[in-house]
């Protein structure tokens, strides 16, 4: 059997990190998923004036302080993107492609994605639209694929898919240098709509229309409702009570994903509440 963790935390922003240190202090076996950069929203902040005890800090400096703190407590970041979380009764299965991690409780701390879905994105989800290119790449062997990439990590997925697909279009939604295989065609245009019949067959951009069998939309985070089937949402946010408990037993949420205001300290505070209640939940089952 896989090792079963006490608390699996998804997200390495202030909410997830605060949950991780509090879970660890309470002697729980914690696994933390995210990335070594911690959070784009953290490193991009030019000046932060409302983080108690750190006046005038830059996002980069606060990130360094967070990194030192978790390293000090021997908390590792597992650099994996969780694609789906299934409630299995008395534990959760967290999926990364075809690999699964097991945990007694889950804390969702995935932040909030500000960009709206494309027209047709939700309609064709599972019928040519996907959020994990590497997971579904084999389905597109010898076919045309389009990747709408919102971050640098999407380039790695694009390179992998380009080895299987007959044609790969990459639509970058950010500026910079793109580290892509030579057979990837970069299209600098704004995507507007995904079109198809029973399956996707085109993507319409501002200036051109591309024939495509699949469209992958690769953002920092996906909608929590898609991440955890059955999770109750309220105005695009995860519905939680004062104890950061969701409608699914053993599943907690913290940070921007639970609603406004979008602030570091609110996120860190909620991460702490979520962790302490996850601990209480685990102990109540003993
Ligand atoms: C430019 C800018 C300036 C800001 N300035 C301030 C400020 O001065 N003061 C203030 O209080 N707030 C500020 N904010 C808001 C603040 O950044 C957010 O409120 C805060 O980062 C929310 O923390 P979080 O932990 O909820 O989520 P995030 O910081 O968004 O972190 C979520 C993390 O989870 C990861 N993740 C998502 N899905 C998955 C998955 N499936 N698997 C693995 N990992 C996943 C993401 O990659 C990300 O790293 C600013 C935001 C921006 C963009």
Image: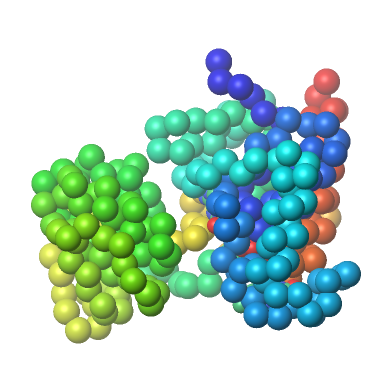
Within the displayed image, which quadrant is ligand 1 positioned in?
Answer: bottom right
Is residue 243 positioned above or below 43 on the image?
above
Q: Nearer the viewer, residue 31 or 275?
A: 31
Q: Which of 128 and 154 is in front in this view?
A: 154
Q: Which quadrant is the C terminus positioned in?
A: top right
The image position of residue 182, as x and y in percent, is 17, 60
Residue 29, image x, y percentages: 73, 30
Q: Quadrant of the N terminus?
A: top right
Considering only vertical position in the picture, is 30 above or below 272?
A: above
Q: In the rendered image, is residue 115 in sight?
A: yes
Report whether residue 233 is seen.
no
| Residue pictured at 83% horizontal, 31% vertical | 27
Report the front residue among 31 and 67.
Answer: 67
Q: Quadrant of residue 124?
A: bottom left
Residue sitting at the far top: 1
Colouring chosen for the image of the structure: rainbow
Residue plotted at (68% across, 62% down): 63
Q: Quadrant of residue 215?
A: bottom left
Residue 160 pos. (x, y %): 27, 48
Q: On the image, which quarter does residue 43 sit in?
A: bottom right
Q: Is residue 227 left or right of residue 62?
A: left
| 123 in relation to 277, above or below | below
Left or right of 18? Residue 195 is left
Extreme-right residue of the structure: 53
Tell me where residue 52 appears, x and y as whole percent. Answer: 87, 70
Q: Residue at x 30, y 79 (%)?
A: 190
């Amino acid at each position: 059997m896989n090792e079963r963790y006490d608390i699996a935390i998804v997200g390495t922003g202030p909410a997830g990190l605060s949950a991780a240190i509090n879970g660890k202090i309470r002697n729980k076996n914690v696994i933390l998923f995210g990335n070594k950069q911690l959070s784009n929203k953290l490193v991009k902040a030019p000046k932060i004036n409302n983080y108690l005890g750190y006046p005038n800090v830059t996002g980069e400096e606060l990130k360094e302080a967070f990194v030192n703190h978790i390293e000090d407590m021997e908390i590792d970041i597992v650099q994996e993107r969780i694609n789906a979380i299934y409630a299995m009764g008395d534990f959760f299965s967290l999926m990364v492609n075809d690999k699964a991690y097991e945990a007694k409780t889950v804390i969702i701390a995935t932040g909030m994605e500000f960009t709206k879905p494309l027209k047709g994105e939700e309609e064709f989800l599972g019928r040519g639209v996907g959020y994990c290119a590497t997971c579904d790449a084999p389905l597109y062997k010898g076919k045309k694929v389009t990747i709408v990439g919102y971050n640098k990590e999407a380039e790695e997925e694009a390179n992998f898919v380009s080895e299987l697909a007959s044609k790969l279009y990459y639509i970058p939604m950010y500026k910079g240098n793109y580290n892509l295989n030579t057979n990837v065609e970069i299209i600098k245009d704004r995507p507007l709509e995904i079109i198809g019949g029973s399956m996707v067959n085109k993507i319409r951009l501002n200036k051109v229309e591309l024939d495509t069998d699949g469209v992958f939309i690769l953002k920092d985070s996906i909608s929590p409702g898609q991440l955890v089937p059955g999770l109750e949402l309220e105005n695009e946010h995860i519905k939680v009570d004062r104890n950061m408990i969701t409608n699914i037993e053993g599943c907690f949420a913290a940070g921007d994903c639970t609603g406004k205001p979008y602030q570091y300290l609110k996120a860190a505070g909620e991460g702490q509440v979520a962790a302490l209640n996850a601990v209480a939940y685990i102990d109540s089952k003993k």
